[in-house]
Image (cartoon, rainbow, N blue to C red):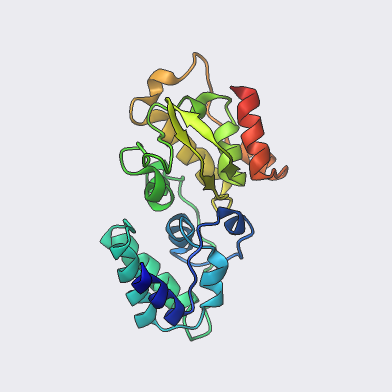
Amino acid sequence: MRSLACFLALTGLTLSVSFAAAQNRFDLPAGPGRDLVYGHCQTCHDLQSVVDSAGIRRGAWDAFLDNMKDYGLRISDDQRARILDYLATYMGPEAPPAPPVAEAVAAADGAQIYADTCIACHQEDGRGKPDEFPPFAGNSDLFLSPDFPATVVLNGIAGPIEVEGAAFDNEMPPFDFLSDDEIAAVIAYVRSEWGNDALRPSGFADVTADEVAALRAKPMASDEVHALRASLK
């Protein structure tokens, strides 16, 4: 662990397991790959530390990603390349390019969004990590109400919970960088995978992008989301 700390000190990055800090994250510059950085890096880091490290060269970011893989970062080669391109382009020594011109947006792909932003904690099979991150597979929380999962995605959740008899006491940061369409799509995907369709109550409708937008306009603290979960149970 000492080598990791030394590496982070040399690059100007700091390791933090406090997700409360991540809730007050600095908005990273818009650009291709940003959502991957949010989805994978804020699992362990206060993203402010990434912002504070802006200016290091591509090789330093490349070495950082190699080091993180040694300590458990699980990303595909394609995801790694996209993250590195983003960090080198938008967080490197040169002035970042202008934000990309808005283009026609294709329908949000829930499976791709899950792969880019959720796998780091909840895993490819939706089973999470024992004692760390709860599973999505077989998780009845997904159906506590049509919009409860969207409330969690937008605001995060903090406090002890029990899922399928297993206890977890971690803190999920908000993933409000996702668009309303993306949040609706990834929730629909998770609710339909790993046999979760069997948990769906009769007539239960998925949350819509418009409903996510309405929730976004009424932010909650992560401990308030925890209390909401308890009230819905």
Along the viewing direction, whichever of 4 and 56 lies nearer the viewer: 4
- Find the residue positioned furthest to the bottom: 94
* Occupied quadrant, residue 18: bottom right
Name the residue located 54 percent from the left edge and 65 percent from the top edge: 47
Q: Which residue does the image show at 31% across and 43% down from the upper left? A: 124
Q: In the picture provided, is 152 more to the left or to the right than 83? A: right
The furthest residue to the right? 218
> In this rendering, is residue 72 above or below 137?
below
From this viewpoint, is residue 96 visible?
yes
Residue at position x 55%, y 54% in the image: 19
Q: State the image coordinates of residue 84 (x, y, percent, origin top left).
A: 37, 71
At x 55%, y 36%, the residue is 160
Regarding residue 98, the answer to whether it shows in the image is: no
Q: Position of residue 51 (x, y in %)?
A: 55, 73
- The C terminus sits in image quarter: top right
Residue 190 at x, y = what percent? 42, 35
Residue 57, image x and y in percent?
41, 84
Which residue appears farthest toward the front when viewing the image? Answer: 2
| Screen quadrant of the N terminus | bottom left
Give left or right: position of 59 versus 94.
left
